[in-house]
Image (cartoon, rainbow, N blue to C red):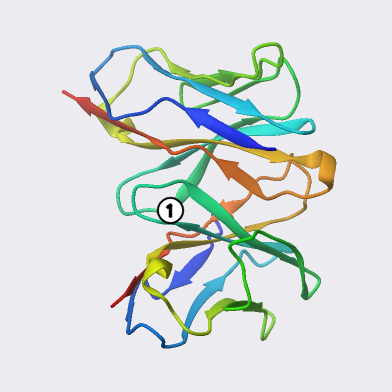
């Protein structure tokens, strides 16, 4: 089946620290991979995506590379800011079934302190 | 930037009552979705909708649930007879297309509390 496993939180970092949030997946077909972010009191916003192996998604200083060999899509940022405090969700959609519904991980809460 | 809007932001309902959650997807989007997130758990897919019919649904989406697009703008989720375990955050989403290159845009959610 399809599932996403991501690093349990919460994660607390100091400003300008390096961030990694691990995400691995299982999929029956060839998935597209996404990171969504949820800021306090808001809905889910697409942060970045990758649709095929070795693609790198990037946005707002965040990056993630689609690694088919390790079935991973780890999120990284070189220098976090207080404004990055949010819950981060890794997700996949399995296009092989012609469907586009998303399978989410449990979310990782990031708190960045000044 | 266009947004998906959901109303109400918080709904409190007695067990056994019907509830309707409303969503206005982005205007040029053709695919619509409902997800839910029980407190402390994963965001889970409920149903997708295209061309006025359900295109896919999960095992969560049983006979108590229904979706409708009553006019050109609204997309609703109805729970016929609510149970305590229906308490969750419900998210609506929409996308232009169904392929992975067209991401889903989410609303801010409706928090449903069943008493």
Q: Position of residue B109 (x, y in %)?
A: 43, 62
- Residue that extends furthest to the left in the rendered view of this protein: A114
Q: Is residue A99 left or right of residue B19?
A: right
Pick the front one: A77 or A105: A105
Pick the front one: B105 or A103: A103
Asked whether residue B74 is in view, the answer is no
Q: Is residue A80 left or right of residue B66?
A: left
How many neighbours does mark 1 have within 10 angstroms: few (below 14), some (14-19), or many (20 or more)?
Answer: many
Determine the image quadrant of residue A2.
top right
Q: Is residue B46 left or right of residue B28?
A: left
Residue at left offset 83%, top offset 39%? A96
Q: Position of residue B75 (x, y in %)?
A: 61, 75
Q: Position of residue B16 (x, y in %)?
A: 41, 86
Pick the front one: B91 or B58: B58
Residue at left offset 29%, top offset 12%? A17
Pick the quarter of the image with the N terminus of chain A: top right
Tag count = 1
Residue designated by label 1 = A43
Determine the image quadrant of residue A104.
top right
Chain under disc 1: A
Residue at left offset 47%, top offset 69%? B6
**Which secondary structure lies at badge 1?**
loop
């Amino acid at each position: 089946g399809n599932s996403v496993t991501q690093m349990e939180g919460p994660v607390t970092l100091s400003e300008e620290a390096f961030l990694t949030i691990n995400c691995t997946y299982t999929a029956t077909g060839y998935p597209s991979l996404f990171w969504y972010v949820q800021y306090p009191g808001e809905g889910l916003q697409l942060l970045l995506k990758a649709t095929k192996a070795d693609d790198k998604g990037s946005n707002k200083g965040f990056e993630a590379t689609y690694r088919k060999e390790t079935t991973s899509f780890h999120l990284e940022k070189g220098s976090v800011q207080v404004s990055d405090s949010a819950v981060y969700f890794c997700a996949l959609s399995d296009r092989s079934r012609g469907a586009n519904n998303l399978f989410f991980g449990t979310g990782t809460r990031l708190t960045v302190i000044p | 930037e266009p947004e998906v809007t959901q109303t109400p932001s918080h709904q409190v309902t007695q067990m056994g009552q019907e509830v309707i959650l409303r969503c206005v997807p982005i205007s040029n989007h053709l695919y619509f979705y409902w997800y839910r997130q029980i407190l402390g758990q994963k965001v889970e897919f409920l149903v997708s909708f295209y061309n006025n019919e359900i295109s896919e649904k999960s095992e969560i989406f049983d006979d108590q649930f229904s979706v409708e697009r009553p006019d050109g703008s609204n997309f609703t989720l109805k729970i016929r007879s609510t149970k305590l375990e229906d308490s969750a955050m419900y998210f609506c989403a929409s996308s232009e297309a169904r392929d992975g290159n067209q991401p889903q845009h989410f609303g801010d959610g409706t928090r449903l509390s069943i008493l």
